[in-house]
Image (tube, rainbow, N blue to C red):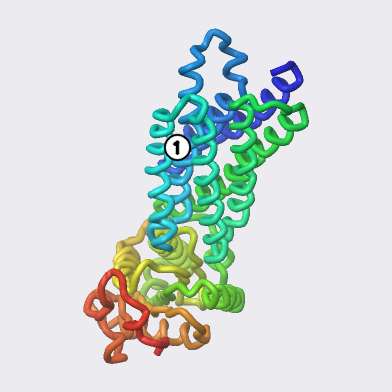
């Protein structure tokens, strides 16, 4: 590696380190698991580039060549495998899509194991095998990020670009590790740019989702200085998003759910906490709903006392029971608001949660919303405060009593439409 090539890779490593340090500072200020995963991701990318680009060998000329090759063989598959594990959490794959979840978790386990198996090959075959494994893992991640894009994840397009740039970066870095002939300065520049950009794009969406998640994880039992209307999609805006989501679902053929949360007895809360206190309550409720359905799913305020959430993909019909009870239980917990006199007052919201199972295929948004609100109204008379239309009888029943089948329900046994 000559001086120009070393300068190119020093700049690439500097840009990666700068992103990692920024995330580290954020981690120190606001510790969380997702923040730690972000720092770990950028650190893994930094080590991958440092080891495979040849900079490590330049910095430590006395390093054992055999140990360096072991590190090069392990670096790619382990980095891609760890990335898949963290991206699975980022995509909320366990909730949204069984195939996505299984593929990412399987990749996170199999890729590092495959890299260990590479060490059993002849020395000349180890690096090519590790490169092939890393490339296949990166290709799988790209496909799953694109799949999340199709499922409506608004940050997945940027993640897809980052994953796409990862592929030439992996191939280029392993070509340099194998010291293939004909790799000039332009090659080094192109690979370094891909490595820095893929780290930047991926880091950006990791940070964006973490910021969104941090906002919803905050304990909002104390007042927030946010207007409850402007913080959520409302009315026509909400309906437009639901219509676009329904168009996507016609292609993805996934089951989904719409939840309507209706707040009753607002006059009682106005008397206790005043109009400002009611707004604080709505902000608190929006945050609790978002925490339960996940930051990847839409939550909006349909009208004054009704929230609506769209979960575009669900693992199974039985999951509807879980989400309905979780949302209802969360919203019925006490909230501490500020009374007109300035003193704190504790209230419990009187709510009903209506759940509608969205089947693959077309369904009119207005019918779905109407059905969800009917279920929410019916839920007020139920102990759990969560209702769904029973597939067998067509009547509103508590979600815990509905016959939703097993965890995996075949297409042939599903009801054919939203009642």
Q: Is residue 62 above or below residue 134?
A: above
Q: Nearer the viewer, residue 344 or 303?
A: 303
For the question of whether residue 274 can be seen, the reply is no
Instruction: Kindly identify the residue that appears in the image at 59 percent across and 27 percent down.
Output: 178
Residue 189, picture quadrant: top right
Residue topped by disc 1: 36
Quadrant occupied by the N terminus: top right
Element on which disc 1 rests: helix
Position of residue 146 in the picture relative to residue 407 (left or right) = right
On the image, the x and y values in percent for residue 175 come to 62, 31
Instruction: Kindly identify the residue that appears in the image at 37 percent across and 79 percent down.
Output: 411
On the image, the x and y values in percent for residue 216 come to 45, 55
Quadrant occupied by the C terminus: bottom left
For the question of whether residue 370 can be seen, the reply is yes
Instruction: Kindly identify the residue that appears in the image at 31 percent across and 62 percent down.
Output: 334
On the image, the x and y values in percent for residue 300 come to 51, 70
Q: Nearer the viewer, residue 72 or 325?
A: 72
Q: Is residue 218 above or below residue 267?
A: above
Q: Is residue 320 above or below residue 41?
A: below
Mark 1: few, some, or many residues within 10 Å (few <14, many ≥20)? some
On the image, the x and y values in percent for residue 253 come to 48, 75
Q: Is residue 272 above or below residue 207?
A: below
């Amino acid at each position: 590696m000559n001086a120009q090539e070393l300068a190119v890779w020093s700049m690439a490593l500097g840009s990666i380190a700068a992103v990692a340090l920024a995330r580290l500072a954020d981690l120190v200020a606001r510790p969380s698991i997702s923040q730690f995963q972000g720092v770990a991701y950028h650190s893994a990318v930094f080590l991958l580039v440092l080891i495979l680009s040849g900079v490590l060998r330049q910095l430590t000329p006395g390093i054992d060549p055999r140990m360096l090759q072991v590190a090069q063989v392990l670096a790619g598959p382990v980095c891609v495998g760890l990335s898949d594990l963290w991206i699975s959490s980022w995509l909320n794959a366990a909730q949204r899509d069984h195939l996505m979840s299984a593929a990412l978790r399987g990749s996170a386990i199999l890729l590092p194991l495959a890299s260990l198996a590479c060490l059993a090959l002849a020395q000349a075959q180890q690096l090519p095998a590790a490169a092939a494994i890393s490339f296949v893992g990166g290709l799988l991640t790209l496909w799953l990020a694109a799949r999340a894009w199709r499922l409506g994840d608004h940050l997945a397009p940027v993640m897809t670009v980052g994953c796409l740039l990862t592929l030439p970066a992996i191939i280029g870095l392993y070509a340099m590790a194998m010291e293939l002939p004909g790799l000039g300065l332009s090659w080094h520049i192109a690979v370094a740019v891909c490595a820095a950009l893929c780290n930047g794009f991926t880091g950006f969406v990791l940070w964006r989702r973490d910021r969104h998640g941090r906002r919803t994880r905050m304990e909002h039992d104390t007042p927030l200085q946010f207007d409850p209307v402007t913080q959520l999609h409302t009315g026509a805006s909400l309906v437009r998003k639901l219509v676009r989501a329904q168009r996507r679902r016609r292609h993805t053929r996934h089951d989904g759910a719409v939840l309507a949360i209706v707040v009753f007895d607002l006059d009682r809360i106005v008397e206790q906490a005043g109009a400002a206190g009611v707004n604080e309550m709505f902000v608190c409720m929006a945050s609790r709903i978002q925490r339960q359905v996940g930051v990847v799913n839409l939550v909006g305020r349909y009208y004054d006392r009704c929230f609506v959430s769209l979960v575009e993909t669900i693992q199974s019909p039985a999951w509807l029971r879980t989400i309905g009870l979780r949302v209802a239980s969360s919203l019925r917990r006490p909230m501490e608001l500020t009374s007109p006199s300035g003193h704190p007052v504790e209230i419990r919201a009187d709510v009903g949660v209506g759940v509608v199972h969205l089947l693959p295929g077309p369904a009119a948004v207005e019918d779905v919303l109407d059905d969800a609100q009917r279920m929410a109204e019916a839920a007020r008379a139920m102990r759990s405060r969560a209702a769904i239309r029973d597939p067998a009888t067509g009547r509103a029943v508590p979600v815990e009593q509905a016959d939703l089948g097993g965890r995996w329900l075949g297409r042939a046994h599903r009801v054919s439409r939203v009642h």
